[in-house]
Image (cartoon, grey):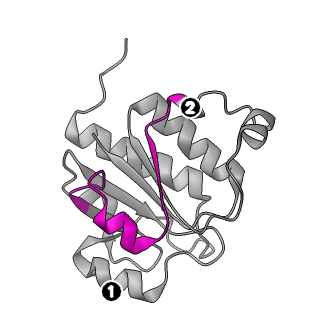
Amino acid sequence: MLHVVLHEPQIPQNTGNVGRMCAFTGCRLHLIHPLGFVINDRNLRRAGMDYWKSLDVYEHADWAQFRLSPHAPRRLWLFTTHGERSFWDAPFADDDGLLFGNEGEGSPAWLHEEIGRAHRLVIPQVQGAAHRSLNLSTAAGIATYEALRQTGLLGRGK
């Protein structure tokens, strides 16, 4: 199983899209607090996230609690615009975690340091393109499907 890890996400629609993708692909979702929104039945219904209760999702009070969790991934890959290594060159494996910072600030410097240079990955962009980040749910989708392709954890059609 792959793990998708969102560090302090701020926008509920992005988290909802990532959750839907995780439900569709069988990935485990980790949400590290604080969140920029409240997850409750009313908000889930309003956002059309009727699948949320069947999602394999874990909420963690903070980074330290995530790291201590028996449900956490074996190894982490941080997706960041500050990476030097393309995600296409990463050898993804079963029980890996794909880690994403929040929409406003990305990942803090201390998290980059903890993960280490070898595990910081970038999604390449066209040379000369405006230096912007992809939307969180788009980046998570791109990364997840590459990791699933490499590991063979997702079937090839019906």
Tell me where residue 87 sits by quadrant. bottom left
How many neighbours does mark 1 have within 10 angstroms: few (below 14), some (14-19), or many (20 or more)? few
Quadrant location of the N terminus? Answer: top left
Quadrant location of the C terminus? Answer: top left
Q: Does the magenta portion include 22? A: no
Q: Going by the image, does 87 lie left or right of 20?
A: left
Residue at point 32% right, 56% down? 97
**Could you say where residue 16 lies in the image, as x and y percent from the top left?**
63, 44
In this figure, which residue is indicated by the disc labeled 1?
113
Label for residue 53?
A: 2
Image height of 38 relative to 27, above or below: below
Q: Of all residues shown, which one is farthest toward the top?
A: 158
Nearer to me, 84 or 6: 6
Q: Does the magenta portion include 73? A: yes
What's under tag 2, amino acid-wise? Lys
Foreground mark, 2 or 1? 2
Q: Can the viewer see residue 5 in this picture?
A: yes
How many neighbours does mark 2 have within 10 angstroms: few (below 14), some (14-19), or many (20 or more)? few
**Could you say where residue 104 lies in the image, as x and y percent from the top left?**
66, 74
Q: Secondary structure at mark 1?
A: helix
Residue at point 25% right, 53% down? 96
Magenta-tinted stretch = 54-75
Pointer 2 with pointer 1, Cβ within 8 A: no
Nearer to me, 16 or 119: 16
Image height of 51 relative to 56, above or below: above
Mark 2–mark 1 distance (CA, rounded to whole Å): 34 Å
**Could you say where residue 39 lies in the image, as x and y percent from the top left?**
67, 49
